Image: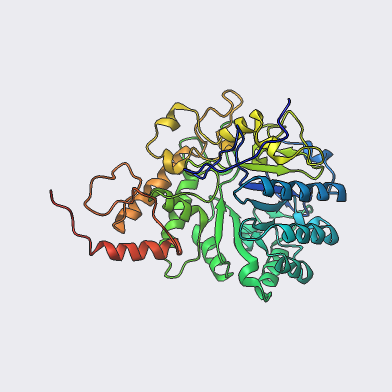
């Protein structure tokens, strides 16, 4: 495949989303796989426990020549694209990269890329966090998100080491080092947890609140129509949706909650706003992954579908190809458009503006490729309808199939939510008591 080497990515002046000069699309997030290996062995890992096996042939860590090329391409792309983009160090376990290489990369990037437009973050299991690394992150304004699924008995269900031993104490030690660091308020972005549908949300939420995480996010377990997610009986069952319903009820009852992204995004979408993450809502996100050998790939969650699902046929590499060329290629555009569901059921659904069809990886089947509803379709629906009901209980209305059945104010325009979502909801609910119905 031949691609242009002079593409300039731009932002559409009207929408601000995924447009370009020519045919390219905007880069929103780039995942940097500094390590292709991990020091723990999660049972649900989409890399090492999924369909993809190509990680076995990758260098264990990024070499100097690849790190230099990554830095060059990111800085180069920042000069071509008007909008900023997020840089996420990922893995495997990204902190398996030797400290000197990690420090050189972060310092070089931060000299050229300001944190307001080019946030850099690390997604880590926390076991390798130490004072020197945290000092580096504070120096380079790199934020840290730690993966932990809940208290020990919950975390041990999926997050053991390669000998089958608990990793909970090591992760907790890393989190405490984060909390004790002088720059904790800017360093620690929050926790990321994978949902175990047979575990009480109350035990997980309560533990994370006591842990003093500044924010939470929760992931559905990987699965599709050929391989159902763990704990899900069939396509119509709603185990994960019911779990999320219990979670939002806990959240809304909490007098001083921290942000919970999966809930906050859903609430914002129900009120006519936008999500901050792909897989929800109708906004598309430009995502690229750079592997340890420098190969540029699609969103790496696609690898759960089949071996090689995340690979471009061009096999582009940062050592020889700029990011704008990849983003303007038809193959990339086609892969980004996969975020838009194609099946008739999704396109006709009243909840599509909120659900967005879910992540493409959840739609896969060998028979119909990605032309399916999400395997979590019924979970999404029951959860979203519960959110709508709870918002109605606060007197708030936005995107719902019943938007005209009440005199209460309806947020058809995107609301400006400039503080924690629950605080915003409560203040708006108070305002509703002063709103008199219009009588024609």
Which is nearer the eye, 366 or 429? 429
Q: Residue at horizontal 55%, vertical 70%?
A: 210
> Can the viewer see residue 416?
yes
Q: What is the x, y in percent for residue 409?
A: 27, 54
Q: Is residue 318 above or below residue 93?
A: above
Q: What is the x, y in percent for residue 94?
A: 75, 54
Where is residue 122, by image quadrant? bottom right
Q: Residue at horizontal 77%, vertical 63%?
A: 128
**Seen in the image, is 361 located left or right of residue 73?**
left
- The number of discs equals 0
Which is nearer the eye, 37 or 250? 37
**Seen in the image, is 403 located left or right of residue 246?**
left
Q: Residue at horizontal 80%, vertical 45%?
A: 292
Q: What is the x, y in percent for residue 388?
A: 35, 50
**Seen in the image, is 254 located left or right of residue 121?**
left
Q: Is residue 235 above or below residue 200?
A: above
Q: Is residue 422 above or below residue 277?
A: below
Which is nearer the eye, 258 or 298? 298
Which is nearer the eye, 271 or 19? 19
Where is residue 150, by image quadrant? bottom right
């Amino acid at each position: 495949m031949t691609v242009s080497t002079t593409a300039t990515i731009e932002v559409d002046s009207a929408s601000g989303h995924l447009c370009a000069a020519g045919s390219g699309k905007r880069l929103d997030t780039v995942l940097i796989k500094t390590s292709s290996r991990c020091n723990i062995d999660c049972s649900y890992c989409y890399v090492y426990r999924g369909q993809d096996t190509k990680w076995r042939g990758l260098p264990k860590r990024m070499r100097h020549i690849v790190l230099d090329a990554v830095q060059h391409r990111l800085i180069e792309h920042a000069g071509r694209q008007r909008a900023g983009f997020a840089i996420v160090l990922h893995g495997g376990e990204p902190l398996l990269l030797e400290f000197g290489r990690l420090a050189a990369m972060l310092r070089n990037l931060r000299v050229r890329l300001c944190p307001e437009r080019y946030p850099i973050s690390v997604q880590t299991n926390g076991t390798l966090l130490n004072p020197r690394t945290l000092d580096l992150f504070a120096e380079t304004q790199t934020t840290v998100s730690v993966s932990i699924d809940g208290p020990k008995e919950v975390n041990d269900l999926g997050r053991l080491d390669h000998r089958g031993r608990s990793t909970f104490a090591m992760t907790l030690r890393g989190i405490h080092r984060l909390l004790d660091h002088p720059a904790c308020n800017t360093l620690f972005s929050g926790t990321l947890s994978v949902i175990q549908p047979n575990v009480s949300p109350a035990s997980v939420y309560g533990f994370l609140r006591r842990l003093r995480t500044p924010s939470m996010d929760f992931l559905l377990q990987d699965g599709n129509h050929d391989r159902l997610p763990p704990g899900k009986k069939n396509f119509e069952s709603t185990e994960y949706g019911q779990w999320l319903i219990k979670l939002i009820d806990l959240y809304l009852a909490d007098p001083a909650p921290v942000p919970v992204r999966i809930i906050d995004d859903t609430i914002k979408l129900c009120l006519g706003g936008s999500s901050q993450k792909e897989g929800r809502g109708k906004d598309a996100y430009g995502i690229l992954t750079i592997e340890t050998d420098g190969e540029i790939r699609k969103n790496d969650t696609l690898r759960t579908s089949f071996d090689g699902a995340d690979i471009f046929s061009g096999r582009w590499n940062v050592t020889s190809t700029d990011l704008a060329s990849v983003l303007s290629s038809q193959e990339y555009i086609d892969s980004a458009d996969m975020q838009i569901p194609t099946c008739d059921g999704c396109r006709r659904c009243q909840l599509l503006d909120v659900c967005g069809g879910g992540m493409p990886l959840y739609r896969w089947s060998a028979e119909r490729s990605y032309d399916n509803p999400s395997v979590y379709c019924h979970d999404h629906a029951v959860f979203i309808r519960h959110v709508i009901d709870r918002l109605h209980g606060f007197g708030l209305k936005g995107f719902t199939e019943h938007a005209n059945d009440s005199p209460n104010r309806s947020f058809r325009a995107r609301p400006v939510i400039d503080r924690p979502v629950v605080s915003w909801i409560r203040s708006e609910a108070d305002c509703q008591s002063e709103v008199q119905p219009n009588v024609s």
